Image (cartoon, rainbow, N blue to C red):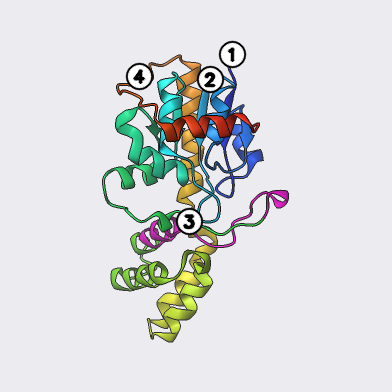
Amino acid sequence: MSTTYVFLGPTLPQEEAARELDAVYLPPVSQGDVLRLCAEKPGAIGIVDGFFENVPAVWHKEILFAIREGIPVFGAASMGALRAAELHPFGMIGVGAIFEAYRDGRLEDDDEVAVIHGPAELGYPALSEAMVNIRRTLADAVADGVLSRETGFRLESIGKELPYRERGYGRMLRLAGDLGLPARELEAFRAWLPTGRFDQKRDDARRMLRTIRRKLGQNAALPEAQFHFERTTLWDRAVREASTLAV
């Protein structure tokens, strides 16, 4: 059986991922990684996390190339959800609530899934909170009666206004207190957080791994490429550059 490869970083610890799916786990994806991986003829590729800003992000065209080569490509939770929302009409398989929100236009900004994280040596620990996790957690707090709808909405606005590198519940609550939001609700929310906080990104990543395991295990029919792949001068250069590096 061909090997499955998954690009993973701060969203889900590798040890936890390995309990869901037997795969080769690689660092967050960056430009050229999927193209180079195609040479290994993988049974499937899963994308959860990816680099951006200071490192070129994974190119749409290399994912399309993998699909054209008959390699199923799955995406969820973070960079994977973004690319799957953009490429699902071409056969990329998106999984989870975050992918669905981007696909349906309920989310648009890339910063919704962005976090700052520590180095690979420490397992890419997340050092900020993703906005998609904050939204889900606040919605649960409102549903549980911990927060009023108005306070939940205002906390969500505070979180969204913060740069993604500075997002976190502690910072949000301090700012909310300074702005005069109801102290009793803020304290109730603070006390509820240790058990009520929901990690939507982690949940979606696990769902993707289970989906890969199920579909490959059942030999389920997967989308076929229904598009023409245009080989441009830029693409040929990318192939040459990728061939000089190993995965």
Query: Mark 2 = which residue?
Result: 43
Query: Mark 1 = which residue?
Result: 1
Distance from the alpha carbon under mark 2 to that under mark 3: 28 Å
Distance from the alpha carbon under mark 2 to that under mark 4: 14 Å
Q: Quadrant of residue 225?
A: top left
Q: Is residue 97 above or below residue 112?
A: above
Distance from the alpha carbon under mark 2 to that under mark 1: 7 Å
Tell me if residue 23 is in the magenta stretch.
no
Query: Mark 3 = which residue?
Result: 114
Instruction: Please report contact status of discs 4 and 3: CB closer than 8 Å, yes or no.
Output: no
Locate residue 93 relative to residue 214 in the image: left or right: left
Mark 4, other Cα within 10 Å: few <14 / some 14–19 / many ≥20: some
Instruction: Please report contact status of discs 2 and 1: CB closer than 8 Å, yes or no.
Output: yes
Q: Name the residue: 64% across, 51% down.
A: 124
Judging depth in this view, the residue of 104 and 200 nearest the camera is: 104
Q: From this viewpoint, is residue 22 visible?
A: yes
Q: Amino acid at mark 2?
A: Gly
Instruction: First in sequence, mark 2 or 4: give its number.
Output: 2
Image quarter (top left, top right, bottom left or bottom right) of the N terminus: top right
Tell me if residue 139 is in the magenta stretch.
yes
Distance from the alpha carbon under mark 3 to that under mark 1: 34 Å
